[in-house]
């Protein structure tokens, strides 16, 4: 069914790849152009929507001043650090739950009841306990990233075909090797899907926590610019967030495709969109 | 075997199952209560469970739970409804038209991973501090997952079905209404199920950041005045709300699309 029109009249040669790519990204250029023209023709109030050129100029100026760099670095540290801790813990708990009935009975109800809690609601509590800063923000991110990784690890392990497990046991594979060599790789596609969901969460939670209360970070920066009426800079900061989140997502997809290079099902699925 | 004995045994089994299935939760509450009773943490930081429950009752009686909750739910579901309508239309159009796919695909890919909550200051600037900015932020957050879900449902419709309809001379509009839309409904519904907690979380978080009433704003207000039991009450309100709606969505799905087998569900 409907996929994008391709430049089929071009010969299928590598040297025309860039033109095909440009054509695919053309809508973004058109979108930016319409935005620029609408503002330049004064169809909207400039203080409500700065033009594209002004926004990029603000982004460039903030980058040169080091304002974006410093705050983005702080936010990335919180987001990705929290994601890393949350993922490692999540995989460990998920593996335990899938392989041990007792672990499942212990963690299951906790996961089920806290899954639908907005983790940002814990920020005020954590501020009370740990003060404003990295501990509060990272703990929130860890909790938010933990649950999707636990659930996807659990389902991934449960979906490993039992035949493979039986063969491994029949050949006398010790328990820890079954875990490490069979269950973990078998669950990896599912685990990484969970990590990708958690990647989205980690940015949302970092920025929420920073906007609720923080001394630094890109979320705080955008919020302060908004409160002080520096709207061009607010849009510049937001642009930086969108680009950073996009690059992080693409980087994770590249890592996934490398780690799952043996998995035909993953590549078949990703080829179809 | 007399009837009473059987019922008693069944009740006993249910209680036993419930105890096994939630002993970690009970343990958590016991540790929490014990820690605050033994004075391990000051009540300002960790009020006892009984204090929180008492405060919950007081706030329920005074209407301070229900009024903000209704406001938050209104924002979340108005935004979600908008996202479902717009997302379904855009998803169907993207699945049926090559040029719409070409125009929307790169924009959706770029916007999908962006943390929408970062738009709060901009939505305040554009739509004010009241409900409208929150409803639109919820809609903005939920519209992309709805679009993607509908799109996948619509392109997943079997070609033979579409060909048969077209061979019988079905016009494109009827094809959309009578064939593609019903066939993609399970995907749409699973999209709604995924975005319902997102809508609630976005509404609560936006209220925490921007104020303007609702459970999120009430929570921040309580924290500012160090009313820790009230903070816990509102956290519990958010937890119960999310839990309740998640279960409601599962029930609704089984009621509305019973022809979908568990295995077939996306």
Image (cartoon, rainbow, N blue to C red):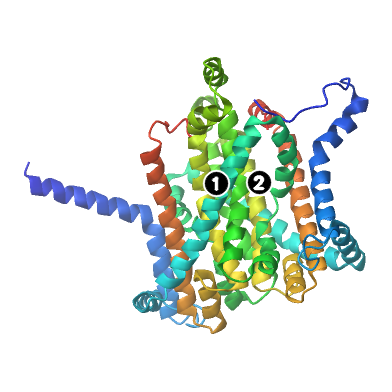
Q: Which residue is drawn at 54% across and 65% down?
A: B204
Tell me if label 2 and label 1 are in contact, CB under 8 Å: no
Q: Which residue is drawn at 43% across and 69% down?
A: B31
Q: How many marks?
A: 2
Q: Residue furthest bottom?
A: B225
Which x, y percent locates residue B11? Answer: 20, 51
Q: Which mark is residue A189?
A: none
Answer with the quarter of the image where residue A242 lies: bottom right
Residue A266 versus residue A113 in the image, above or below: above
Q: Nearer the viewer, residue A174 or B73?
A: B73
Which x, y percent locates residue A207? Answer: 68, 63
Q: How crowded is mark 2: few (under 14 residues within 10 Å), some or many (20 or more)?
A: many
Which x, y percent locates residue B52? Answer: 41, 76
Horizontally, residue B159 falls left or right of residue B9, namely right
Residue A107 versus residue A155 in the image, above or below: below
Disc 2 element: helix
Q: Residue at x 55, y 15 (%)?
A: B167
- Residue B91 visible at all: yes
Horizontally, residue A239 falls left or right of residue B144, namely right
Task: Identify the subunit bearing mark 2.
Answer: A
Residue A170 versus residue B190 in the image, above or below: above
Disc 1 element: helix
Q: Residue at x 61, y 39 (%)?
A: B91
Answer with the quarter of the image where residue A127 lies: bottom right
Residue with the mark numbered 2: A196
Q: Which of B245 and A55 is in front in this view?
A: A55
Q: Which mark is residue B85?
A: 1
Q: Which quadrant holds the N terminus of chain A? A: top right
């Amino acid at each position: 069914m409907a996929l994008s029109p391709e430049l089929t009249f071009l010969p299928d040669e590598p040297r025309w790849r860039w033109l095909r790519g440009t054509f695919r990204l053309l809508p973004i250029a058109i979108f930016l152009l319409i935005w620029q023209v609408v503002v330049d023709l004064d169809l909207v109030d400039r203080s409500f929507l700065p033009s594209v050129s002004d926004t990029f100029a603000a982004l460039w100026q903030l980058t040169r001043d080091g304002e974006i760099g410093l705050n983005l670095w702080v936010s990335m540290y919180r987001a990705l650090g929290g994601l890393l801790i949350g993922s490692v813990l999540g995989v460990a708990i998920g593996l335990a739950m899938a392989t041990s009935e007792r672990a499942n009975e212990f963690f299951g109800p906790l996961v089920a009841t806290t899954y639908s809690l907005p983790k940002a609601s814990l920020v005020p509590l954590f501020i009370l306990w740990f003060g404003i800063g990295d501990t509060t923000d990272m703990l929130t991110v860890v909790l938010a990233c933990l649950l999707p990784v636990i659930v996807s690890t659990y389902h991934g392990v449960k979906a490993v075909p039992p035949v493979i497990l039986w063969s491994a046991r029949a050949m006398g594979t010790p328990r820890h090797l079954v875990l490490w060599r069979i269950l973990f790789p078998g669950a990896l596609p599912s685990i990484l899907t969970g990590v990708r969901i958690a990647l989205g969460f980690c940015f949302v939670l970092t920025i929420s926590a920073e906007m609720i209360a923080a001394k630094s970070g890109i979320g705080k920066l955008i919020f302060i610019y908004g409160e002080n009426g520096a709207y061009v800079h607010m849009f510049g900061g937001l642009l930086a967030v969108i680009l950073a989140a996009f690059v992080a997502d693409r980087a994770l997809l590249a890592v996934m495709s490398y780690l799952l290079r043996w998995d035909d099902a993953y590549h078949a699925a990703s080829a179809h969109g | 075997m007399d009837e009473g004995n059987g019922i008693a045994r069944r009740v006993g089994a249910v209680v036993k199952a419930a105890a096994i299935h939630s002993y970690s939760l009970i343990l958590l509450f016991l540790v929490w209560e014990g820690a605050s009773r033994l004075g391990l943490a000051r009540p300002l930081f960790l009020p006892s469970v009984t204090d929180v429950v008492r405060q919950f009752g007081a706030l329920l009686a005074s209407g301070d739970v229900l009024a903000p909750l209704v406001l938050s739910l209104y924002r979340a579901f108005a935004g979600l409804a908008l996202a479902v309508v717009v997302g379904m239309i855009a998803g169907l159009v993207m699945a049926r038209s090559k040029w719409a796919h070409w125009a929307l695909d790169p924009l959706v890919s770029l916007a999908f991973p962006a943390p929408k909550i970062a738009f709060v200051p901009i939505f305040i600037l554009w739509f004010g501090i009241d409900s409208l900015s929150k409803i639109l932020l919820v809609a903005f957050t939920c519209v992309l997952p709805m679009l993607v879900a509908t799109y996948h449902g619509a392109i997943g419709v079997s070609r033979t079905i579409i060909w048969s309809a077209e061979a019988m001379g079905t016009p494109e509009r009827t094809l959309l209404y009578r064939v593609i839309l019903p066939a993609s409904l399970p995907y749409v519904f699973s999209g709604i199920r995924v975005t319902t907690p997102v809508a609630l979380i976005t509404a609560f978080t936006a209220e925490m950041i921007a104020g303007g009433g609702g459970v999120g704003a009430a929570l921040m207000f309580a924290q500012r005045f160090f009313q820790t039991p009230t903070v816990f009450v509102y956290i519990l309100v958010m937890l119960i709300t999310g839990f309740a709606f998640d279960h409601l969505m599962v029930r609704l799905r089984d009621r509305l699309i019973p022809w979908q087998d568990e295995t077939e569900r996306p």
